Amino acid sequence: MSGEDGDVVRRDRFSGGPARAFLSSMDHDERLFDADLAVDRAHVVMLAEQGIVDEGSAGAILDALIDVEATDYDALDGEDVHAAIETAVIERVGESGGRMHTARSRNDEVATCIRYRLREELLDAIDATLVLREALVEAAREHVETVMAGYTHRQAAQPTTVAHFLCSYARALERDTDRLLAAYDRTDRSPLGAAAFAGTPFDVDRERTADLLGFDSVLRNSMDAVSTRDFMIETASALSTLSVSLSGLATDLIEFAADEYVEIDDDYASTSSIMPQKKNPDTLELVRAASGSANAGLNGLLTTLKGLPRAYNRDLQEATPHVWTAVDAVTPATEVAAGAVATAAWNEDALAAAAGEGFATATGVADLLAANGVPFRTAHAILARPAQRAADGTSGETAGLDPAASVASRNSVGGPAPEAVAAALDEAGAGIETDEERRDERRDRLDAAAAALEREVGRYR
Ligand code: ARG
């Protein structure tokens, strides 16, 4: 699909040759197809409103775009989706279809298309983080009193609760949502009208095309507008960071499942093709692996973009797929993690037994001594001996210390005591609602813009 001929942008000059397929981005551009159609529509409407293109030509071009939209992507022919759509329009309209590309370049066009599509991808990623946060908070509400061992260095350290553990991830995810929203807001700016990089002599209305495409604002420097891909780095970075949160959650669940502290639902488990007794947490392993792709995407972007001079260089074409790599890995992983958390069954007895093992309450006893006047360092030294004997298995006398009482005593802000966690869960729930509103505002703006664009297009047809 690199197009052998027929590309009106290239015509007969530079149009063939052995590097044609190498130059083409058609294989990656399907993702920008709808975006390009919207960008074309907004641009043509603006050109007509500004009197740059006559209404008759605008109407014919807008009609042709409807027809192009209905055709199979694979039937398009061109160096990239932008050239291919323009070619298809000219095939339908005739020479005056070439007026569509007045006062723009593929440079501002492609940058606008990427941002247009990436906003959707970001909203989907944001959705997924909200669903996961909801699943974590809901599961936590069920387990405010479910005592478990908390770990440092992979060793049982102090008793905590399943709710406290789950809420720790809900809080991390809250920041992930926030980073994605910030990336959205910086993606939500229009490069259209920057032309190749140096503006245009035509009296374009950049605010108008930005509005018609639902962008929040216009990028103010035309050279910056076509050059920058920082919004892609920022998006991939936010996704990478999210993937790190997911990978930790996945590892915890995988290990807890191996210890039978939690059972992963059959829907999120897999079987062995040879060992009939096995139930494997494959989905969570794949969730954990999403980081590899996310980080590859981020690294691909950073490496491709570093050192590029102003203004447009074809390297930019090669940068774009890296951000899709990150998106495609992390959003589904987030959705699957949410399902796995929502359906997991926590084994309260096994967790409680483990919480009491290995003298995990030693810190609580040291705290008790310190609260009664013994300097904490001295208390720590006193407890070291029974802790050692418990570790050696030469004394079982530590079992009398109650993990639940130990948890209940730690009611500092953010601590695991049930009333502290209950308050934290209310906050976390309110945070989800706030972020759902932030997401809805953005989605509503996109929907309203799409409807307005359709109305405007209708005037010419
Ligand atoms: N497909 C190209 C891209 O993704 C379009 C821009 C081509 N512009 C140019 N000046 N050669 O960047």
Image (spheres, rainbow, N blue to C red):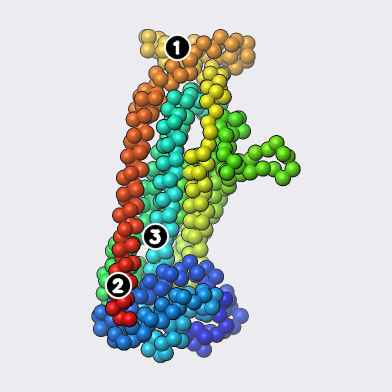
Looking at the rendering, in which quadrant would you find the N terminus? bottom right
| Kind of element beneath mark 3 | helix
Residue pushed farthest right? 274
**Dot 2 amino acid type:** Arg
**Residue shown at 49% from the left, 87% from the top:** 11
Q: Is residue 265 left or right of residue 93?
A: right
- Between tags 2 and 1, which lies in front? 2
**Position of the C terminus by quadrant:** bottom left
- Earlier in the chain: of badge 1 and badge 3, it is 3
Q: What residue type is labelled 1?
A: Thr
Which amino acid is tagged 3? Answer: Arg
**Distance between the alpha carbons at the discs numbered 3 and 2:** 22 Å
- Asked if 145 appears above or below 76 in the picture, the reply is above
Between discs 3 and 2, the one toward the N terminus = 3
Instruction: Identify the mark nearer the N-term, 2 or 1.
Output: 1
Could you tell me which residue is drawn at 46 percent across and 63 percent down?
A: 305
Is any atom of residue 24 visible in this view? no
Disc 2 target residue: 455
Compared with 21, 254 (above or below) is above
Residue indicated by mark 1: 378
Is residue 343 in sight in this rendering? yes
Q: What crowding class fits label 3: few (fewer than 14 Cα within 10 Å), some (14-19), or many (20 or more)? A: many
Say whether marks 3 and 2 touch (CB < 8 Å). no
Rendering coords of residue 300 (x, y %): 52, 59
Q: Residue 119 carries which label?
A: 3
Q: Residue at image x 55%, y 80%? A: 3
Quarter of the view holding residue 55: bottom left
